[in-house]
């Protein structure tokens, strides 16, 4: 999948601009408050155990960015498709 390849490329030190050029994807940094759970998200539970993940994010940051898409009919700007726990923990 292109998203996975892009995440690996960034993790290996490639810049966002390089990843955008190679994949055609657009990367944007947004505050977690701007992100809702997308209807396409595979997770359906509202409460997620994120304590260990929160500790990890504090230590090393988010290694693999969540995958989101713009939402038009929502109070939030983006919907998280993959990475709901990472967004919740952040």
Image (cartoon, rainbow, N blue to C red):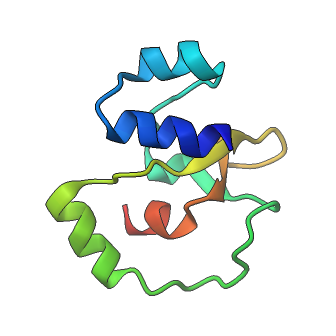
In the image, 33: left or right of 54?
right
Q: Residue at x 55, y 12 (%)?
A: 21
Q: Is residue 77 left or right of residue 6?
A: right
Question: Residue 62 occupies which quadrant of the picture?
Answer: bottom left
The residue nearer to you, when weighing 12 against 70, is 12
Count of number-bearing discs: 0
Q: Residue furthest left?
A: 59
| 2 lies left or right of 64 | right
Residue 48 versus residue 76 in the image, above or below: below
* Residue under the point 60% across and 24% down: 26
Q: Is 23 or 41 nearer to us in this picture? A: 23
Question: Which corner quadrant holds the N terminus?
Answer: top right
The percent coordinates of residue 38 (x first, y second) are 74, 58
- Look at the image and tell me in which quarter the C terminus lies: bottom left
* Between 62 and 35, the one nearer to me in the picture: 62
Q: Residue at x 69, y 76 (%)?
A: 43
* Image quadrant in which you'd find residue 14: top left
Determine whether 25 is above or below 76 in the image. Answer: above
Residue 9: x, y in percent?
Answer: 43, 34
* Picture coordinates of residue 70, whole percent (x, y): 72, 37
């Amino acid at each position: 999948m292109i998203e996975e390849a892009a995440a690996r490329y960034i993790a290996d030190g490639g810049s966002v601009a390089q990843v955008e050029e190679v994949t055609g994807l657009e990367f944007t940094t947004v505050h977690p408050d701007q992100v809702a759970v997308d209807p396409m998200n595979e997770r359906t539970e509202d409460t997620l155990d994120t304590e260990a993940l929160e500790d990890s994010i504090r230590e090393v940051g988010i290694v693999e960015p969540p995958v989101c898409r713009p939402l038009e009919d929502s109070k939030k700007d983006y919907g998280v498709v993959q990475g709901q726990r990472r967004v919740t923990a952040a």
